[in-house]
Image: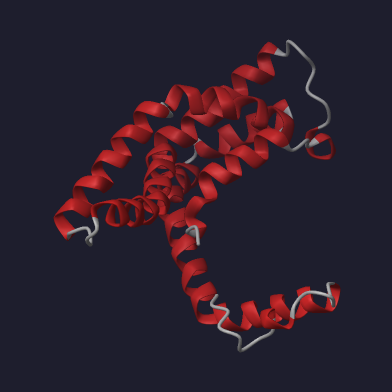
Amino acid sequence: MRDRRRGPWALLALLLLAPYPALAGEVAPGSARHEALARTLVRMELDAGGYAEMIRQEADADLPDFQDLLAERLGREITSDESDVMGNLLVRVLEQTFPEAAVVEALVPVYMRIYTPEDTERILAFYRTPAGTRMLRARAAIDRGAADAGDRLFDARRQLFGDRFLEALLRHFPDWPLELNRGAGVAY
């Protein structure tokens, strides 16, 4: 199963594809002021550690899949040293493949859909205050802590979630085979 920390990239894809007209209204094409404000906000957030954290979380999410694939192909387990090297290489290749400038370009239209120019100005003004600066610097750590807390919570309730989801599926699809029923070796 994929690690839930795929959040940053999955969220980026979701935001790029999802319309947000109810949040900020339609963005006027060619709104240079709005685009400049959004670009400033995106850069400020990414420069404060958001980009590095996004890359780190993606590498953490992808590493187990690559380890499993390589272990299968090599016919042996991956050593701790090999895993460390793979993790570092994964970060480097992600940075090369998804440079910060490309992430900025992808996020600017998203921010423009979500925030009005006035909202963006207010957020930027807040980030320039001492409290805003502290919040911005702490954002990557907060995101990492929230992801870790979510992982712990999900791990603690994995079986309960799996049982409830399977029960809901079987109620919705009563013709599915009974071997899907609880206790038939379904692991969550």
12, 165: nearer the viewer: 165
Q: Quadrant of the C terminus?
A: bottom right
Would residue 75 appear left or right of 19 to someone viewing this image?
left
Residue sitting at x 66%, y 33%: 16
Is 28 in front, or is 1?
1
Marker count (numbered): 0
Q: Residue at coordinates 83% horizontally, 72% vertically from top-left?
A: 173
- Coloring basis for residues: secondary structure
Q: Quadrant of residue 137?
A: top left
Residue 166 appears left or right of 89: right
Specify whether 59 is left or right of 153: left
The residue sitting at the bottom extreme is: 183
Q: In terms of image quadrants, where is residue 41?
A: top right
Q: Is residue 174 above or below residue 40?
A: below
Q: Residue at x 35, y 52 (%)?
A: 69
Q: Name the residue: 49% across, 39% down.
A: 129
- Residue 53: horizontal and vertical position, in percent? 40, 45
Q: Position of residue 100 (x, y in %)?
A: 43, 27
Q: Position of residue 74 (x, y in %)?
A: 24, 53
Q: Residue furthest left?
A: 81
